[in-house]
Image (cartoon, rainbow, N blue to C red):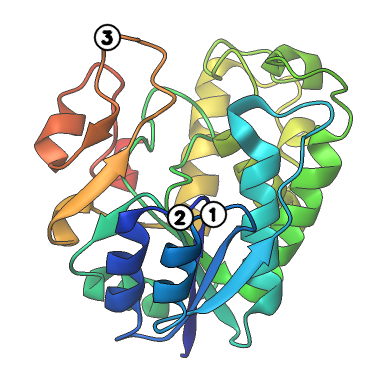
Amino acid sequence: MKITFVIQGPLTCETIKTAKICKKYGEVIVSCWDNDCPNLIKNLGRHAKIIKNKFFKPKGYNFQNIQYHIKTFFEGVRAAKTDYVIKLRSDEYFTDISNLVDTARKNPNKITTCNFLFRPDVLFHPSDHIIGGKKKSLFSMLIWSMEFIKNFKEDKPVSAKRVGLKSELFYKDITAELTFCISYLKSKGINVVEDIKGMDDKELKKYHKKIMNDHYALVRASDMGNFLFRFKGNPDITGPTAFTSEEQFLNYNLKSIKSLKEL
Protein backbone atom coordinates (compact mmCIF):
# COMPACT_ATOMS: atom_id res chain seq x y z
CA MET A 1 0.00 0.00 0.00
CA LYS A 2 1.50 3.29 -1.12
CA ILE A 3 1.16 6.21 1.29
CA THR A 4 1.28 9.98 0.96
CA PHE A 5 2.19 12.00 4.03
CA VAL A 6 0.49 15.38 4.34
CA ILE A 7 2.28 17.75 6.71
CA GLN A 8 -0.10 20.62 7.34
CA GLY A 9 0.05 24.00 9.02
CA PRO A 10 2.44 26.95 9.39
CA LEU A 11 6.05 25.99 8.70
CA THR A 12 8.53 25.47 11.53
CA CYS A 13 12.02 24.00 11.81
CA GLU A 14 10.35 20.70 12.75
CA THR A 15 8.65 20.50 9.35
CA ILE A 16 11.89 19.74 7.50
CA LYS A 17 12.86 17.03 10.00
CA THR A 18 9.46 15.35 9.62
CA ALA A 19 9.53 15.62 5.82
CA LYS A 20 12.94 13.91 5.63
CA ILE A 21 11.77 11.03 7.83
CA CYS A 22 8.46 10.58 5.99
CA LYS A 23 10.22 10.59 2.63
CA LYS A 24 11.69 7.18 3.45
CA TYR A 25 8.19 5.69 3.45
CA GLY A 26 6.29 7.52 0.74
CA GLU A 27 5.46 10.73 -1.05
CA VAL A 28 5.40 13.91 1.06
CA ILE A 29 3.16 16.94 0.61
CA VAL A 30 3.59 20.03 2.77
CA SER A 31 0.42 22.13 2.84
CA CYS A 32 1.35 25.50 4.32
CA TRP A 33 0.59 29.20 3.81
CA ASP A 34 1.76 31.74 1.27
CA ASN A 35 3.06 33.96 4.08
CA ASP A 36 5.33 31.29 5.57
CA CYS A 37 9.10 31.82 5.69
CA PRO A 38 10.45 31.80 2.08
CA ASN A 39 13.69 30.10 3.16
CA LEU A 40 11.80 27.28 4.83
CA ILE A 41 9.63 26.86 1.74
CA LYS A 42 12.72 26.74 -0.48
CA ASN A 43 14.51 24.19 1.71
CA LEU A 44 11.41 22.01 2.00
CA GLY A 45 11.07 21.96 -1.77
CA ARG A 46 14.00 19.52 -1.87
CA HIS A 47 12.09 16.96 0.17
CA ALA A 48 8.41 17.46 -0.55
CA LYS A 49 5.76 18.87 -2.85
CA ILE A 50 4.77 22.28 -1.50
CA ILE A 51 1.24 23.65 -1.54
CA LYS A 52 1.15 27.33 -0.62
CA ASN A 53 -2.41 28.11 0.44
CA LYS A 54 -3.51 31.72 0.36
CA PHE A 55 -3.77 32.90 3.95
CA PHE A 56 -7.20 34.25 4.86
CA LYS A 57 -9.07 35.90 7.67
CA PRO A 58 -11.70 33.38 8.77
CA LYS A 59 -15.32 34.37 8.92
CA GLY A 60 -17.53 32.82 11.56
CA TYR A 61 -16.60 29.81 13.67
CA ASN A 62 -12.87 29.15 14.04
CA PHE A 63 -12.52 27.58 17.50
CA GLN A 64 -9.08 25.91 17.80
CA ASN A 65 -8.24 27.41 14.39
CA ILE A 66 -10.34 24.67 12.83
CA GLN A 67 -10.83 26.53 9.55
CA TYR A 68 -7.06 26.73 9.08
CA HIS A 69 -6.69 23.08 10.04
CA ILE A 70 -9.34 21.97 7.57
CA LYS A 71 -8.00 24.11 4.73
CA THR A 72 -4.40 22.89 4.87
CA PHE A 73 -5.48 19.30 5.54
CA PHE A 74 -8.03 19.35 2.70
CA GLU A 75 -5.66 20.77 0.08
CA GLY A 76 -2.99 18.26 1.02
CA VAL A 77 -5.39 15.33 0.73
CA ARG A 78 -6.74 16.64 -2.57
CA ALA A 79 -3.23 16.76 -4.04
CA ALA A 80 -2.31 13.22 -2.94
CA LYS A 81 -2.05 10.64 -5.71
CA THR A 82 -2.12 7.55 -3.49
CA ASP A 83 -5.17 5.81 -2.07
CA TYR A 84 -3.90 6.23 1.51
CA VAL A 85 -2.90 9.42 3.31
CA ILE A 86 -1.40 10.13 6.72
CA LYS A 87 -1.77 13.68 8.05
CA LEU A 88 0.81 15.12 10.44
CA ARG A 89 1.29 18.56 11.97
CA SER A 90 4.00 20.91 10.73
CA ASP A 91 5.13 21.81 14.27
CA GLU A 92 5.67 18.24 15.50
CA TYR A 93 8.12 15.44 14.72
CA PHE A 94 8.73 11.72 15.23
CA THR A 95 12.04 9.98 14.55
CA ASP A 96 10.58 6.51 13.91
CA ILE A 97 7.30 6.20 12.00
CA SER A 98 7.71 2.53 11.05
CA ASN A 99 5.04 1.41 13.55
CA LEU A 100 2.68 4.12 12.31
CA VAL A 101 3.11 2.91 8.73
CA ASP A 102 2.72 -0.76 9.73
CA THR A 103 -0.46 -0.06 11.71
CA ALA A 104 -1.94 1.92 8.82
CA ARG A 105 -1.17 -0.90 6.37
CA LYS A 106 -2.76 -3.49 8.66
CA ASN A 107 -5.89 -1.35 9.13
CA PRO A 108 -6.57 0.31 5.77
CA ASN A 109 -10.30 0.70 6.43
CA LYS A 110 -9.83 2.47 9.77
CA ILE A 111 -8.49 5.80 10.90
CA THR A 112 -5.01 5.35 12.34
CA THR A 113 -4.10 7.85 15.02
CA CYS A 114 -1.88 8.21 18.09
CA ASN A 115 -2.66 8.06 21.80
CA PHE A 116 -1.63 11.65 22.58
CA LEU A 117 -4.78 13.28 24.02
CA PHE A 118 -6.94 10.41 22.84
CA ARG A 119 -9.18 10.88 25.83
CA PRO A 120 -10.55 7.97 27.92
CA ASP A 121 -12.87 10.29 29.86
CA VAL A 122 -14.47 12.16 26.94
CA LEU A 123 -16.56 10.50 24.25
CA PHE A 124 -15.56 10.66 20.57
CA HIS A 125 -12.32 12.51 21.30
CA PRO A 126 -9.59 10.70 19.36
CA SER A 127 -6.33 12.52 18.81
CA ASP A 128 -6.25 14.79 15.76
CA HIS A 129 -2.46 15.20 15.74
CA ILE A 130 -2.04 12.19 13.46
CA ILE A 131 -4.86 11.08 11.17
CA GLY A 132 -4.30 8.32 8.64
CA GLY A 133 -6.93 6.85 6.35
CA LYS A 134 -8.02 6.20 2.80
CA LYS A 135 -7.91 9.36 0.71
CA LYS A 136 -11.58 9.02 -0.18
CA SER A 137 -12.59 8.67 3.49
CA LEU A 138 -10.49 11.63 4.65
CA PHE A 139 -11.82 13.76 1.82
CA SER A 140 -15.40 12.94 2.83
CA MET A 141 -14.58 13.56 6.49
CA LEU A 142 -13.31 17.05 5.70
CA ILE A 143 -16.32 17.87 3.51
CA TRP A 144 -18.66 16.81 6.33
CA SER A 145 -16.56 18.82 8.81
CA MET A 146 -16.99 21.95 6.72
CA GLU A 147 -20.72 21.33 6.52
CA PHE A 148 -20.89 20.79 10.27
CA ILE A 149 -19.18 24.03 11.32
CA LYS A 150 -20.79 26.31 8.75
CA ASN A 151 -23.91 26.38 10.92
CA PHE A 152 -22.01 28.18 13.66
CA LYS A 153 -21.91 31.84 12.68
CA GLU A 154 -19.86 33.32 15.53
CA ASP A 155 -16.21 32.77 16.38
CA LYS A 156 -16.74 31.43 19.88
CA PRO A 157 -17.05 27.98 21.49
CA VAL A 158 -20.27 26.12 20.75
CA SER A 159 -21.86 23.88 23.37
CA ALA A 160 -22.01 20.18 22.45
CA LYS A 161 -25.57 20.19 23.74
CA ARG A 162 -26.53 22.52 20.89
CA VAL A 163 -26.14 19.67 18.40
CA GLY A 164 -27.82 17.06 20.59
CA LEU A 165 -24.81 15.72 22.51
CA LYS A 166 -26.36 16.23 25.92
CA SER A 167 -24.54 13.69 28.08
CA GLU A 168 -21.92 14.96 30.51
CA LEU A 169 -19.64 12.29 29.04
CA PHE A 170 -18.98 14.62 26.09
CA TYR A 171 -16.61 17.55 26.33
CA LYS A 172 -18.68 20.63 27.04
CA ASP A 173 -17.80 22.36 23.75
CA ILE A 174 -17.50 21.12 20.19
CA THR A 175 -13.82 20.50 19.48
CA ALA A 176 -11.85 19.79 16.33
CA GLU A 177 -11.39 16.23 17.59
CA LEU A 178 -15.15 15.70 17.94
CA THR A 179 -15.86 17.42 14.62
CA PHE A 180 -13.44 15.22 12.69
CA CYS A 181 -14.55 12.05 14.50
CA ILE A 182 -18.31 12.35 13.99
CA SER A 183 -17.77 13.64 10.44
CA TYR A 184 -15.57 10.65 9.60
CA LEU A 185 -18.15 8.28 11.06
CA LYS A 186 -20.91 10.04 9.13
CA SER A 187 -18.93 9.47 5.92
CA LYS A 188 -19.04 5.76 6.84
CA GLY A 189 -22.83 5.88 7.25
CA ILE A 190 -22.82 6.20 11.05
CA ASN A 191 -24.84 9.12 12.42
CA VAL A 192 -23.69 9.40 16.02
CA VAL A 193 -26.06 12.22 16.96
CA GLU A 194 -29.09 10.24 15.78
CA ASP A 195 -27.88 6.87 17.04
CA ILE A 196 -27.41 7.96 20.64
CA LYS A 197 -30.82 9.57 21.12
CA GLY A 198 -32.46 8.05 24.18
CA MET A 199 -29.34 6.21 25.36
CA ASP A 200 -28.38 6.36 29.01
CA ASP A 201 -24.72 6.79 29.95
CA LYS A 202 -24.09 3.05 30.27
CA GLU A 203 -25.47 2.39 26.79
CA LEU A 204 -23.58 5.38 25.44
CA LYS A 205 -20.24 4.13 26.77
CA LYS A 206 -20.82 0.68 25.28
CA TYR A 207 -21.78 2.20 21.90
CA HIS A 208 -18.74 4.50 21.96
CA LYS A 209 -16.30 1.69 22.75
CA LYS A 210 -17.59 -0.51 19.93
CA ILE A 211 -17.64 2.27 17.34
CA MET A 212 -14.14 3.47 18.16
CA ASN A 213 -12.67 -0.04 18.19
CA ASP A 214 -14.39 -0.85 14.89
CA HIS A 215 -13.23 2.28 13.08
CA TYR A 216 -9.97 3.42 14.70
CA ALA A 217 -6.48 1.94 15.08
CA LEU A 218 -3.92 3.22 17.57
CA VAL A 219 -0.18 3.82 17.63
CA ARG A 220 1.45 4.67 20.93
CA ALA A 221 3.79 7.64 21.10
CA SER A 222 6.33 5.42 22.84
CA ASP A 223 6.56 3.39 19.61
CA MET A 224 7.50 6.42 17.49
CA GLY A 225 11.06 7.08 18.59
CA ASN A 226 11.88 10.54 19.86
CA PHE A 227 8.98 12.90 19.37
CA LEU A 228 7.51 16.31 20.00
CA PHE A 229 3.78 16.79 20.51
CA ARG A 230 2.44 20.32 20.86
CA PHE A 231 -0.38 21.36 23.17
CA LYS A 232 -0.66 25.06 22.37
CA GLY A 233 -4.34 25.09 23.28
CA ASN A 234 -3.78 23.95 26.85
CA PRO A 235 -6.61 25.60 28.84
CA ASP A 236 -4.28 25.83 31.85
CA ILE A 237 -2.08 28.84 31.13
CA THR A 238 0.49 27.56 33.64
CA GLY A 239 0.53 24.06 32.11
CA PRO A 240 2.85 22.53 29.50
CA THR A 241 2.46 23.39 25.83
CA ALA A 242 4.56 20.48 24.54
CA PHE A 243 5.45 16.90 25.46
CA THR A 244 8.51 14.82 24.55
CA SER A 245 7.79 11.58 26.42
CA GLU A 246 4.73 9.38 26.70
CA GLU A 247 5.13 9.20 30.47
CA GLN A 248 4.77 12.99 30.64
CA PHE A 249 1.39 13.13 28.97
CA LEU A 250 0.05 9.86 30.42
CA ASN A 251 0.60 11.33 33.89
CA TYR A 252 -0.83 14.73 33.00
CA ASN A 253 -4.22 15.66 34.43
CA LEU A 254 -5.82 15.54 30.97
CA LYS A 255 -5.62 11.80 30.46
CA SER A 256 -4.65 9.88 27.32
CA ILE A 257 -5.18 6.20 26.59
CA LYS A 258 -2.55 3.52 25.99
CA SER A 259 -4.97 1.15 24.26
CA LEU A 260 -8.44 1.26 22.72
CA LYS A 261 -9.43 -1.31 25.35
CA GLU A 262 -9.40 1.53 27.89
CA LEU A 263 -12.39 3.26 26.32
**Taking 36 as reference, is 57 above or below it?**
above
- Name the element at disc 2: loop
- Front of the two marks 1 and 2: 1
Residue identified by numbered label 3: 238
Along the line of sight, which residue is nearer the eye, 93 or 34?
Answer: 34
Residue identified by numbered label 2: 11
Residue 107 appears in the picture as rendered: no
Label whose residue precedes the other's in the sequence (1 or 3):
1
Number of other residues with Cα within 10 Å of mark 3, as a class: few under 14, some 14 to 19, many 20 or more: few
- Front of the two marks 1 and 3: 1
- Front of the two marks 2 and 3: 2
- The answer to whether 209 appears left or right of 164 in the picture is left
Residue identified by numbered label 1: 36
Residue found at x 39% / y 22%: 121
Compute the Cα span from label 1 to label 2: 6 Å
Amino acid at the residue labelled 2 = Leu
Amino acid at the residue labelled 3 = Thr
